[in-house]
Protein backbone atom coordinates (compact mmCIF):
# COMPACT_ATOMS: atom_id res chain seq x y z
CA UNK A 1 0.00 0.00 0.00
CA UNK A 2 1.10 3.56 -0.75
CA UNK A 3 1.29 5.62 2.45
CA UNK A 4 -0.14 9.12 1.92
CA UNK A 5 -0.24 12.20 4.15
CA UNK A 6 -2.80 14.96 3.52
CA UNK A 7 -2.02 18.56 4.54
CA UNK A 8 -5.13 20.73 4.17
CA UNK A 9 -6.84 23.28 6.42
CA UNK A 10 -10.35 22.54 5.11
CA UNK A 11 -12.00 19.64 6.92
CA UNK A 12 -14.24 18.97 3.93
CA UNK A 13 -11.28 18.79 1.54
CA UNK A 14 -9.35 16.47 3.88
CA UNK A 15 -12.30 14.06 3.77
CA UNK A 16 -12.74 14.57 0.01
CA UNK A 17 -9.08 13.82 -0.77
CA UNK A 18 -9.01 10.86 1.63
CA UNK A 19 -12.06 9.34 -0.07
CA UNK A 20 -10.49 9.75 -3.52
CA UNK A 21 -7.23 8.12 -2.46
CA UNK A 22 -8.89 5.23 -0.65
CA UNK A 23 -11.11 4.56 -3.67
CA UNK A 24 -7.99 3.53 -5.61
CA UNK A 25 -7.57 0.51 -3.34
CA UNK A 26 -3.80 0.92 -3.18
CA UNK A 27 -3.44 4.03 -1.00
CA UNK A 28 -3.51 4.19 2.79
CA UNK A 29 -4.03 7.65 4.30
CA UNK A 30 -1.72 7.47 7.31
CA UNK A 31 -2.44 10.96 8.63
CA UNK A 32 -3.68 14.49 8.06
CA UNK A 33 -2.45 17.94 9.08
CA UNK A 34 -3.99 21.42 9.02
CA UNK A 35 -0.96 23.52 8.00
CA UNK A 36 2.64 23.31 6.85
CA UNK A 37 4.15 23.15 10.32
CA UNK A 38 1.91 20.25 11.38
CA UNK A 39 2.61 18.64 8.02
CA UNK A 40 6.38 18.85 8.48
CA UNK A 41 6.15 17.21 11.90
CA UNK A 42 3.91 14.46 10.48
CA UNK A 43 6.34 13.80 7.62
CA UNK A 44 9.20 13.26 10.06
CA UNK A 45 7.09 11.09 12.37
CA UNK A 46 5.04 8.99 9.93
CA UNK A 47 7.45 8.74 6.95
CA UNK A 48 4.82 8.87 4.16
CA UNK A 49 5.55 7.77 0.59
CA UNK A 50 3.79 10.86 -0.79
CA UNK A 51 2.34 14.10 0.57
CA UNK A 52 -0.68 15.94 -0.84
CA UNK A 53 -0.80 19.55 0.34
CA UNK A 54 -2.90 22.64 -0.19
CA UNK A 55 -0.96 25.77 -1.11
CA UNK A 56 -2.95 28.26 0.98
CA UNK A 57 -3.20 27.53 4.71
CA UNK A 58 -3.11 29.69 7.87
CA UNK A 59 0.28 30.51 9.44
CA UNK A 60 2.34 27.92 7.58
CA UNK A 61 1.42 27.41 3.93
CA UNK A 62 2.30 24.85 1.29
CA UNK A 63 5.37 26.78 0.16
CA UNK A 64 6.74 26.65 3.71
CA UNK A 65 6.14 22.91 3.82
CA UNK A 66 7.94 22.26 0.54
CA UNK A 67 10.89 24.46 1.48
CA UNK A 68 11.38 22.81 4.88
CA UNK A 69 10.52 19.23 3.92
CA UNK A 70 12.82 19.07 0.90
CA UNK A 71 15.71 20.20 3.12
CA UNK A 72 14.97 18.20 6.24
CA UNK A 73 13.00 15.11 5.17
CA UNK A 74 12.66 14.88 1.37
CA UNK A 75 9.49 13.27 0.03
CA UNK A 76 7.44 13.63 -3.18
CA UNK A 77 4.92 16.45 -2.60
CA UNK A 78 1.84 17.04 -4.76
CA UNK A 79 0.47 20.60 -4.59
CA UNK A 80 -3.23 21.42 -4.73
CA UNK A 81 -3.94 24.97 -5.83
CA UNK A 82 -7.03 27.04 -6.47
CA UNK A 83 -5.03 30.25 -6.61
CA UNK A 84 -4.93 32.50 -9.65
CA UNK A 85 -3.21 35.66 -8.52
CA UNK A 86 -0.56 33.75 -6.58
CA UNK A 87 0.14 31.05 -9.16
CA UNK A 88 3.77 32.20 -9.13
CA UNK A 89 4.02 30.47 -5.73
CA UNK A 90 3.31 27.16 -7.42
CA UNK A 91 6.35 27.56 -9.67
CA UNK A 92 8.47 28.62 -6.71
CA UNK A 93 7.39 25.44 -4.91
CA UNK A 94 8.21 23.33 -7.97
CA UNK A 95 11.64 24.96 -8.16
CA UNK A 96 12.16 24.04 -4.50
CA UNK A 97 11.43 20.38 -5.21
CA UNK A 98 7.66 19.79 -5.24
CA UNK A 99 6.72 16.87 -7.48
CA UNK A 100 3.74 18.32 -9.36
CA UNK A 101 0.64 20.47 -8.95
CA UNK A 102 -3.04 19.90 -9.57
CA UNK A 103 -6.10 22.16 -9.65
CA UNK A 104 -8.38 21.69 -6.66
CA UNK A 105 -11.92 20.64 -7.65
CA UNK A 106 -14.27 23.59 -8.08
CA UNK A 107 -17.31 21.69 -6.82
CA UNK A 108 -18.14 19.00 -4.27
CA UNK A 109 -18.36 16.38 -7.00
CA UNK A 110 -15.32 17.41 -9.02
CA UNK A 111 -15.01 13.95 -10.57
CA UNK A 112 -12.40 15.16 -13.06
CA UNK A 113 -10.04 15.53 -10.11
CA UNK A 114 -10.09 11.86 -9.04
CA UNK A 115 -8.08 10.07 -11.74
CA UNK A 116 -5.38 12.77 -12.17
CA UNK A 117 -4.74 12.76 -8.42
CA UNK A 118 -4.52 8.98 -8.22
CA UNK A 119 -2.24 8.88 -11.29
CA UNK A 120 0.07 11.48 -9.73
CA UNK A 121 0.21 9.58 -6.44
CA UNK A 122 1.17 6.38 -8.28
CA UNK A 123 3.84 8.20 -10.30
CA UNK A 124 5.24 10.02 -7.26
CA UNK A 125 5.98 6.79 -5.40
CA UNK A 126 8.53 5.69 -7.99
CA UNK A 127 10.37 9.01 -8.04
CA UNK A 128 13.94 9.47 -6.88
CA UNK A 129 13.62 12.54 -4.64
CA UNK A 130 17.14 13.57 -5.62
CA UNK A 131 15.81 14.43 -9.09
CA UNK A 132 13.32 16.79 -7.42
CA UNK A 133 15.97 18.72 -5.49
CA UNK A 134 17.22 20.83 -8.36
CA UNK A 135 20.22 23.12 -8.14
CA UNK A 136 19.50 26.45 -9.80
CA UNK A 137 21.33 26.70 -13.15
CA UNK A 138 23.21 29.85 -14.06
CA UNK A 139 21.72 32.02 -16.78
CA UNK A 140 23.79 32.07 -19.96
CA UNK A 141 24.37 35.77 -20.70
CA UNK A 142 26.86 35.10 -23.48
CA UNK A 143 26.24 35.33 -27.18
CA UNK A 144 27.17 32.43 -29.42
CA UNK A 145 28.64 32.43 -32.92
CA UNK A 146 26.18 30.73 -35.24
CA UNK A 147 26.53 29.67 -38.86
CA UNK A 148 25.14 32.11 -41.43
CA UNK A 149 23.20 29.24 -42.97
CA UNK A 150 21.36 27.38 -40.22
CA UNK A 151 20.70 23.65 -40.36
CA UNK A 152 17.40 24.02 -38.50
CA UNK A 153 14.63 26.62 -38.35
CA UNK A 154 12.74 25.69 -35.16
CA UNK A 155 13.05 23.89 -31.83
CA UNK A 156 9.86 22.24 -30.55
CA UNK A 157 9.66 21.02 -26.95
CA UNK A 158 7.15 18.77 -25.21
CA UNK A 159 6.91 18.12 -21.46
CA UNK A 160 4.51 17.11 -18.70
CA UNK A 161 5.17 16.11 -15.06
CA UNK A 162 8.46 17.68 -13.96
CA UNK A 163 8.49 19.82 -17.08
CA UNK A 164 8.60 23.32 -15.54
CA UNK A 165 11.92 22.61 -13.84
CA UNK A 166 13.39 20.92 -16.92
CA UNK A 167 12.26 23.78 -19.16
CA UNK A 168 13.85 26.33 -16.84
CA UNK A 169 17.18 24.48 -16.98
CA UNK A 170 16.97 24.25 -20.77
CA UNK A 171 16.13 27.90 -21.40
CA UNK A 172 18.60 29.33 -18.88
CA UNK A 173 21.39 27.44 -20.63
CA UNK A 174 20.71 28.85 -24.09
CA UNK A 175 22.79 31.75 -25.44
CA UNK A 176 21.29 35.24 -25.47
CA UNK A 177 21.17 35.32 -29.28
CA UNK A 178 19.59 31.92 -29.95
CA UNK A 179 18.71 32.20 -33.66
CA UNK A 180 15.39 30.36 -34.15
CA UNK A 181 11.98 30.26 -32.44
CA UNK A 182 11.39 27.75 -29.65
CA UNK A 183 7.85 26.46 -29.16
CA UNK A 184 6.93 24.60 -25.96
CA UNK A 185 3.89 22.44 -25.25
CA UNK A 186 3.82 21.91 -21.47
CA UNK A 187 0.86 20.08 -19.95
CA UNK A 188 -0.55 22.79 -17.69
CA UNK A 189 -3.91 24.45 -16.93
CA UNK A 190 -4.41 27.70 -18.82
CA UNK A 191 -4.50 29.87 -15.70
CA UNK A 192 -0.90 28.91 -14.94
CA UNK A 193 0.47 29.39 -18.46
CA UNK A 194 0.74 33.19 -18.33
CA UNK A 195 2.46 33.10 -14.93
CA UNK A 196 4.87 30.47 -16.22
CA UNK A 197 5.70 32.67 -19.23
CA UNK A 198 6.40 35.63 -16.93
CA UNK A 199 8.62 33.47 -14.73
CA UNK A 200 10.58 32.16 -17.72
CA UNK A 201 10.90 35.66 -19.15
CA UNK A 202 12.75 36.69 -16.00
CA UNK A 203 15.07 33.68 -16.18
CA UNK A 204 16.29 33.98 -19.77
CA UNK A 205 17.61 36.67 -22.09
CA UNK A 206 15.19 35.58 -24.80
CA UNK A 207 11.62 36.84 -25.14
CA UNK A 208 9.01 34.49 -23.65
CA UNK A 209 5.28 34.74 -24.37
CA UNK A 210 2.13 32.69 -24.83
CA UNK A 211 1.53 31.88 -28.51
CA UNK A 212 -1.47 33.66 -30.05
CA UNK A 213 -3.60 32.43 -32.95
CA UNK A 214 -2.44 34.11 -36.17
CA UNK A 215 0.87 35.25 -34.68
CA UNK A 216 4.00 34.92 -36.81
CA UNK A 217 6.91 32.92 -35.37
CA UNK A 218 10.06 34.98 -34.87
CA UNK A 219 13.68 34.17 -33.98
CA UNK A 220 14.88 34.94 -30.43
CA UNK A 221 11.38 34.18 -29.12
CA UNK A 222 10.14 31.37 -26.89
CA UNK A 223 6.46 30.55 -27.23
CA UNK A 224 4.31 28.59 -24.78
CA UNK A 225 1.29 26.81 -26.23
CA UNK A 226 -2.04 27.85 -24.74
CA UNK A 227 -3.74 25.62 -22.20
CA UNK A 228 -7.17 26.36 -23.70
CA UNK A 229 -6.76 24.53 -27.01
CA UNK A 230 -4.33 22.51 -29.12
CA UNK A 231 -1.78 24.69 -30.91
CA UNK A 232 -0.39 23.89 -34.34
CA UNK A 233 1.90 25.71 -36.75
CA UNK A 234 0.81 26.42 -40.32
CA UNK A 235 2.44 28.11 -43.30
CA UNK A 236 0.56 30.96 -44.93
CA UNK A 237 -0.05 30.30 -48.63
CA UNK A 238 0.01 34.04 -49.32
CA UNK A 239 3.12 35.14 -47.44
CA UNK A 240 4.94 31.83 -46.76
CA UNK A 241 5.24 32.95 -43.13
CA UNK A 242 4.80 30.40 -40.34
CA UNK A 243 1.87 31.18 -38.04
CA UNK A 244 0.24 29.75 -34.94
CA UNK A 245 -3.22 28.26 -35.39
CA UNK A 246 -5.89 26.58 -33.27
CA UNK A 247 -6.40 22.89 -34.03
CA UNK A 248 -10.03 21.89 -33.53
CA UNK A 249 -9.51 18.12 -33.49
CA UNK A 250 -8.52 16.26 -30.33
CA UNK A 251 -5.69 13.78 -29.79
CA UNK A 252 -5.59 10.45 -28.02
CA UNK A 253 -2.89 11.04 -25.41
CA UNK A 254 -3.48 14.58 -24.11
CA UNK A 255 -5.13 17.84 -25.12
CA UNK A 256 -4.91 21.58 -24.45
CA UNK A 257 -2.06 21.53 -25.18
CA UNK A 258 -1.20 18.38 -27.10
CA UNK A 259 2.49 17.73 -27.74
CA UNK A 260 1.56 15.45 -30.64
CA UNK A 261 -0.45 18.26 -32.23
CA UNK A 262 2.52 20.62 -32.07
CA UNK A 263 5.07 18.06 -33.25
CA UNK A 264 2.95 16.76 -36.14
CA UNK A 265 2.45 20.29 -37.45
CA UNK A 266 6.18 21.03 -37.08
CA UNK A 267 6.97 17.91 -39.13
CA UNK A 268 4.53 19.03 -41.82
CA UNK A 269 5.74 22.63 -42.04
CA UNK A 270 9.48 22.41 -41.32
CA UNK A 271 10.31 18.92 -42.68
CA UNK A 272 14.01 18.22 -42.01
CA UNK A 273 14.61 21.70 -40.58
CA UNK A 274 13.16 20.88 -37.14
CA UNK A 275 14.60 19.83 -33.80
CA UNK A 276 12.22 18.15 -31.35
CA UNK A 277 13.00 17.71 -27.65
CA UNK A 278 10.85 15.44 -25.48
CA UNK A 279 11.23 15.97 -21.75
CA UNK A 280 10.07 14.43 -18.48
CA UNK A 281 6.41 13.49 -18.16
CA UNK A 282 3.81 10.77 -17.67
CA UNK A 283 2.30 8.92 -20.62
CA UNK A 284 3.43 9.02 -24.22
CA UNK A 285 2.17 12.31 -25.64
CA UNK A 286 4.64 13.45 -28.30
CA UNK A 287 5.72 10.00 -29.44
CA UNK A 288 3.59 10.02 -32.59
CA UNK A 289 4.68 13.54 -33.48
CA UNK A 290 8.38 12.99 -32.87
CA UNK A 291 8.26 9.84 -35.01
CA UNK A 292 6.91 11.99 -37.85
CA UNK A 293 9.63 14.61 -37.34
CA UNK A 294 12.29 11.90 -37.48
CA UNK A 295 10.62 10.41 -40.58
CA UNK A 296 10.85 13.82 -42.27
CA UNK A 297 14.57 14.04 -41.51
CA UNK A 298 14.41 16.29 -38.47
CA UNK A 299 16.45 15.77 -35.29
CA UNK A 300 14.94 14.19 -32.17
CA UNK A 301 16.29 14.45 -28.62
CA UNK A 302 14.94 12.67 -25.53
CA UNK A 303 15.77 13.55 -21.94
CA UNK A 304 17.55 10.66 -20.25
CA UNK A 305 15.98 8.59 -17.49
CA UNK A 306 18.37 9.71 -14.75
CA UNK A 307 17.43 13.38 -15.05
CA UNK A 308 13.67 12.85 -15.54
CA UNK A 309 11.21 13.32 -12.71
CA UNK A 310 8.95 10.85 -14.53
CA UNK A 311 10.49 8.77 -17.32
CA UNK A 312 7.33 8.28 -19.35
CA UNK A 313 7.18 10.45 -22.47
CA UNK A 314 10.93 10.15 -23.23
CA UNK A 315 10.79 6.41 -22.56
CA UNK A 316 7.99 6.01 -25.11
CA UNK A 317 10.09 7.82 -27.71
CA UNK A 318 13.21 5.77 -26.93
CA UNK A 319 11.28 2.48 -27.06
CA UNK A 320 9.81 3.52 -30.42
CA UNK A 321 13.42 3.99 -31.61
CA UNK A 322 12.55 7.59 -32.49
CA UNK A 323 15.24 9.31 -30.41
CA UNK A 324 18.38 10.28 -32.30
CA UNK A 325 20.03 11.27 -29.02
CA UNK A 326 19.27 10.63 -25.33
CA UNK A 327 20.71 13.45 -23.23
CA UNK A 328 20.84 14.55 -19.56
CA UNK A 329 18.76 17.70 -19.01
CA UNK A 330 21.85 19.68 -17.94
CA UNK A 331 23.47 18.91 -21.30
CA UNK A 332 20.47 19.58 -23.55
CA UNK A 333 21.01 23.40 -23.84
CA UNK A 334 24.58 23.01 -25.05
CA UNK A 335 23.70 20.07 -27.26
CA UNK A 336 20.89 21.96 -29.00
CA UNK A 337 23.07 25.06 -29.39
CA UNK A 338 25.81 22.98 -31.02
CA UNK A 339 23.34 21.83 -33.68
CA UNK A 340 23.35 25.39 -35.06
CA UNK A 341 27.13 25.86 -35.08
Image (cartoon, helix red, strand yellow):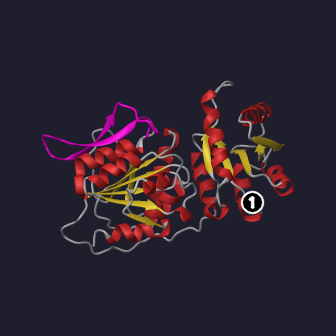
Residue 22 visible in the snapshot: yes
In screen coordinates, is 227 left or right of 105?
left
Magenta span of residues: 228-257
* Quarter holding residue 257: top left
- Residue at image x 66%, y 39%? 118
Front position in the image: 122 or 336: 122
Q: Is residue 334 left or right of residue 47?
A: left
Q: Residue at x 62, y 60 (%)?
A: 132
The residue drawn where x is 33% and y is 35% is: 246
Q: Nearer the viewer, residue 215 or 227?
A: 227
- Residue named by callout 1: 68
Please name whichever residue, 84 or 114, is drawn nearer the observer in this view of the structure: 114
Residue at 61% x, 63% y is 131
- Asked if residue 170 is among those painted magenta in the image, a careful observer would answer no
Chief secondary structure of the magenta portion: loop
As rendered, which of 14 and 57 lies closer to the eye? 14
Q: Quadrant of the N terminus?
A: top right
Name the spot of residue 282 as percent of width and height, x first: 54, 48
Q: Position of residue 302 (x, y in %)?
A: 43, 60
Amino acid sequence: MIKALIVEDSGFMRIRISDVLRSAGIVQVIGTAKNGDEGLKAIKLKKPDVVITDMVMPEYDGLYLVKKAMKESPVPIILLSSLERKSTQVFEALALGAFEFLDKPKSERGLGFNKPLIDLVKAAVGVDVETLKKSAPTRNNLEHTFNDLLNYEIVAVGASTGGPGAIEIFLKGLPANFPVPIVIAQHMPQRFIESFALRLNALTNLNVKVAEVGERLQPNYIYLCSGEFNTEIVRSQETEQTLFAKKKSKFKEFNDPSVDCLFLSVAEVYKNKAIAVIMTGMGKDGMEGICKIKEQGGLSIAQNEKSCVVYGMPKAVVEAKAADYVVHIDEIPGFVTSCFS
